[in-house]
Image: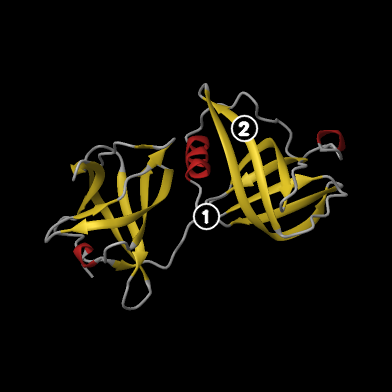
């Protein structure tokens, strides 16, 4: 399948690689012609982000989606992404070269975990009373945390909120997730969750952490002590 075979409004995952770092975000096909595809841009704080990824600049752009006919996951690797104005709106223009104009099957997904150890609050369902937790690690599809030993949620749907400063910039992260597993570790509840909604702020936070930026609020312990997890909200 050629890139120009994508359907209008088809959902894509755009992946940007820089060394061992990566960031991924969702996009949708807006329009296309015989050689390029125009897709919706990345939004950060409500504004379109001007991105230009071309060969020789140290950043690689990959595209992932499902083939409309087979439903199999396919990809185009190392394509060109540039920012253009179409109908007075900023969009991304995707273009392949001669060696990569045909998609390849791509069934592998990398969900590398990153230990963050940051203080947070978890909210159970519609409750306005948060419980103090420590987020232990994150990935692009999941998040795990330590909670007090008496933490017994009423539903599997949780909301997690935390703030962190990276390179003097504050990141406020709200995550909606569902519980996948719960175990007892170090006298506390260890809860693993799966992310249930697209969350660009969460993805950007993970990307910045993977860049190795220093975090002023990072907790140095590997596992929480009893005093770190208040049983009160």
Q: Left or right of 88: which side holds 166?
A: right
The outermost residue toward the top is 168
Eyeballing the image, is 141 above or below 44? below
Q: Where is residue 153 in the image (x, y as percent from the top left)?
A: 79, 55
Front tag of 1 and 2:
2
Q: Which mark is residue 163?
A: 2
Q: Which mark is residue 132?
A: none
Residue holding disc 1: 111
Q: Do the residues labelled 1 and 2 touch (CB within 8 Å)?
A: no
Residue located at (87% from left, 47% from top): 187
Label 2: how many Cα within 10 Å (few below 14, some 14–19, many 20+): some
The quarter of the image holding the N terminus is: bottom left
Residue located at (76% from left, 58% from top): 182
Mark 1 and mark 2: span between their CA atoms?
A: 23 Å
Label 2: state its secondary structure: strand
Residue located at (32% from left, 71% from top): 67
Q: Where is residue 152 in the image (x, y as percent from the top left)?
A: 83, 54
The image quarter containing residue 96 is bottom left
């Amino acid at each position: 399948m050629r890139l120009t075979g994508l359907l209008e409004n088809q959902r894509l995952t755009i992946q940007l690689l820089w060394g061992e770092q990566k960031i991924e975000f969702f996009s949708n096909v807006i329009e296309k012609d015989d050689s390029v595809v125009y897709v919706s841009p990345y939004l950060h704080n409500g504004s379109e982000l001007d991105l230009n990824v071309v060969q020789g600049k140290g950043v690689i752009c990959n595209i992932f989606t499902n083939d409309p006919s087979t439903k199999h996951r396919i990809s185009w690797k190392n394509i060109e992404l540039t920012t253009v104005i179409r109908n007075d709106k900023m969009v991304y223009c995707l273009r392949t070269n001669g060696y990569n104009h045909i998609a390849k099957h791509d069934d592998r997904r990398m969900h590398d975990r990153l230990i963050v150890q940051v203080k947070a609050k978890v909210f159970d369902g519609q409750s306005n009373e948060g419980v103090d937790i420590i987020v232990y690690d994150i990935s692009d599809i999941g998040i795990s945390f330590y909670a007090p030993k008496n933490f017994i949620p009423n539903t599997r749907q949780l909301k997690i909120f935390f703030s962190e400063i990276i390179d003097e910039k504050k990141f406020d992260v709200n995550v909606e997730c569902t519980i996948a597993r719960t175990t007892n570790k170090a006298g506390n509840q260890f809860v693993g969750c799966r992310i249930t909604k697209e969350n660009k702020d969460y993805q950007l936070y993970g990307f910045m952490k993977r860049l190795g930026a220093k975090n002023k609020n990072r907790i140095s312990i590997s596992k929480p002590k009893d005093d770190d997890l208040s049983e009160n909200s």
